[in-house]
Image (spheres, coloured by chain):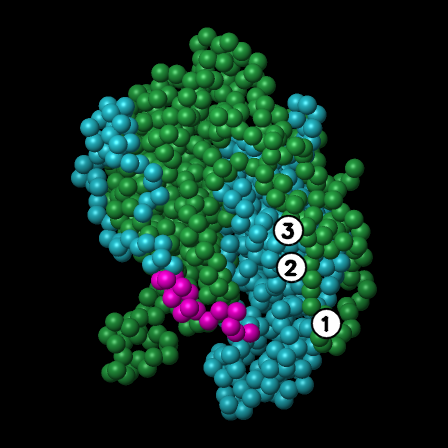
Amino acid sequence: MSYVPHTDADRAEMLAAIGVEAVEDLFHDVPAAQRFPDLDLPDPLSEMEIMAELQAISEENLDLGHFTSFLGAGAYQHYVPRIVDHVISRSEFYTAYTPYQPEISQGTLQSIFEYQSMICALTGVEVANASHYDGATSTAEAVVMALNVARGKRKRVILSPGVHPEYRAVIRTYVQGMDLDIVGDDDLTADLNDLAALLDKDTACLVVQSPNFFGEIEDLAGLAEKVQAARALLIVVTDPISLGMLKPPGEYGADIVVGEGQALGNGLNYGGPYLGLFACREKHVRKMAGRLVGETVDTEGRRGFVLTLSTREQHIRRERATSNICTNQALCALATSVHLAALGPAGMRKLAELCYHKAHYAASRIAALDRFQVVGQKPFFKEFVVRCPAPVKAINDYLLAEWGIIGGYDLGKDYPHLEDHMLICVTEVISKEEIEALADALSEAVEEVAS
Amino acid sequence: MKADFGVRCAGAEPVIYELSKPGRNATTLPALDVPQAELPPASMLRDGIDLPEVDELTLMRHYVRLSQLNWAIDIGFYPLGSCTMKYNPKVNEAAARLPGFAHTHPYQDVHTVQGNLLLLYELQEMLAEIAGFSAVTLQPSAGAHGELTGVLMMRAYHLDRGEPQRVRIIVPDSAHGTNPATTGMAGLEVVEVPSDDRGNVDLEALRTVCGDTVCGLMLTNPNTLGLFEEHLQDVIDLIHDCGGLVYGDGANFNALLGIAKPGELGFDVMHYNLHKTFSTPHGGGGPGVGAVGVSEALAPFLPGPLAVMCRCDEDDCGCGCDCGDDEIAADAVCFHLAMPEKSIGRVKAFYGNFGVLVRAYTYIRMLGAAGLREVSEMAVLNANYLKSQVQGLYPISHDRIHMHEFVAKGIIPDAPDVHALDIAKRLIDYGFHPPTNYFPLIVPEALMIEPTETESKETLDAFAAALRAIRGEAVTDPEVLHEAPHSAPVRRLDEVRAARQPVLRWQGD
């Protein structure tokens, strides 16, 4: 099944029109020794057979429809309203290409314009682009942008250790050819004051995450002034759900706001596809990478939307482009828009507060257990850190085997000083009963696995 | 055959903020079932968010109406050159939405996601086999992302061999703009080489830039003219002989499935566009996957983690079956995630656009080897057939057998004021998406046409007939072309105004 419509008669007529005898004659430019190789692949399957096989493969997983999960750490289980999948399942959206012909792409273009508008509202800065690949690449592109704003003359990048470890890894991958001085997260316990002390005249940007990887809300007041005094840019990585209640980074003076947008409208999907939020101050827009949609008029004066400011982009500037990115995660951004518009301001507030209160209830229940301790002095949003009396893996194995609970993230993997520390995430999908079960399960696990 | 946009959508759709009325809402959330906690200090809280307030029906109608302003593969022919707008099979969508895949968290213990890892592992293996490579990463999210991955690996390879002076990337003038942009991002230098009069890389020019500062060559093959390099072996040998690596831009891989394996042709690294060649939907600009395949020499540098297979009777797999037990089946395996030895690092959080990977996996398993070869054969047949119907109407860039696409020139001698853009826009009125235009840059008035294998002869004939009719109109009534499109939801848009007076978000009436 190749989804091709060609009958034998079609093939014969078409070959005759081309003036060759056989399809093979179309490939004479391919070196004969390498032409028509065998492909060692499994035999083809019918639709019925592949769906049965995939069903079986998918059922080898333990999925969150059957197990309660307290995993977060950058990928979040939130309820996605049904309307989202209905909208993104429309062929007119998902089988369209990048909107290069604006006259017949107004649906995609206007939906991106609306997405940009809503992301600006959420983050509190003036310009948002059409999205990047994910939160990690958004953050890396923000660093590259800061280097460009400094015209390549500043080589220091300050990273908070509270930025997601994989985001910091991706930043390092992206800039490995740029000969930079990356500091800050060499001390995994550095706080905002320690980071600010690293600011100097060679600093291009300071990257901080709030809520940080540990779920804590960083006190950003005053940080932007210090960064600006060094003429560097403040990049804030954030969780869009938290912005339902928390003061947005733009109001603290952030120059660039980035984050993982998955939590709004996109399922977990084992890590992707997600979307990278990317927003910045208007004065920096011409250094911003990624697609931007702008409003304009047609020849009859009617409102319409186009891709704009393309002189920043690779197909015009080639090697002098701000980035090589040419696309966005349009369908994921559409899902985010639909979810945001469905929630509205009241729904966003309620959603954020549900996460906040449930997470705090869970923290209070766990803090009351013998030998478990909720650590951290700062206010937190929907995640918190628990010091466990045994290795996190041993506890999690017990929770899963005996209680059907998928426990929290093992922080010791990325933060050696946090061995035996678990990052627990609680969102609106977790019920009070499930929180009680977690507390009971942890309490029981101690008896079984901690010596 | 005219498009009927005007009938389906009488007027422009308001921006969603213009549909907003305070107090409306389109979502329900459960009541709080735990005691309220104390909120953070008021100084940390926001006052409100300027989001639209709409009911669910208004929201659904808004997006349905917006969707009706779009062209899409499921509506009609979409011959965008180098974009491979083939049919997106519906079974792929069902596969990606299987709850066992869709509702898994990327940080679950590997032993609880063996189905996901098996799929990742098998897709890595199948893609490697199809293109003749030793190993594949599925992590990059787009073609440009795959390019960055590949070029960073080439750089790392030379550094590892103690050759830091290799900083130059050779790029032909027919290349996609991403190639030089990627080179710049990786901190390397671009050297452009011209094409010869048959559309190949100019061998003499290439020879003069080869040397011990060359990191590698980025080559799209078939190139953006739709032509297979006639001196491919010479080109690859020149680069290899000077110590460089050859990067294949896989944007045009739809021409080569079962036809040739780039790895066997001598390419060291190549990105695949799963959203082009392997039928996953473009989604209006993403998500895609720019998987990267590499030779054995480059495999240690791949970004990670990769899915790897462990034998339960030999490896310390920890999968739960007792490894010391004689009862264990000799062929028992389980899957893990591992970082390659000299990895350039992660290029993305987690493991790739998994939902897209499920779609591509489904497609490859349904087609098998024979089906994949048929894809490329019919893609190339369609391109050459359509070219045979167009070549009397518009000049073709090169008089050769083409691969999966060809480039016509929008030049009509009796209508000198008519340009490729006018022809492209007029095609909209005839019910077709225009070809890619003004690319590649080396062909004047370029109309780059890629029909793909999923289009029928009748569709190609109708498209050729429209091009013929437009050629006639260009002479008798050029204004109708200059003012086209006439039947789209909007007329030509003022892009200069959009760039000079940027309005990038809704700011009220």
Q: Secondary structure at mark 1?
A: loop
Type of amino acid under label 2: Asp
Q: Residues within 10 Å of mark 3 (few under 14, many from 20)?
A: many
Residue B201 seen in the figure: no
Nearer mark to the viewer, of 2 and 1: 1
Q: Earlier in the sequence, mark 2 or mark 3?
A: 2
Residue B420 seen in the figure: yes
Mark 2–mark 1 Cα distance, whole angstroms, equals 21 Å
The residue at 59%/28% (across/down) is B488
Type of amino acid under label 3: Val
> Residue extending furthest left?
A33
Rendered green, the chain in question is B
Query: Which subunit holds the residue at mark 1?
Result: B
Rendered cyan, the chain in question is A
Looking at the rendering, which quadrant does residue B81 occupy?
top left
Mark 2–mark 3 Cα distance, whole angstroms, equals 18 Å
Q: Which mark is residue A239?
A: 2
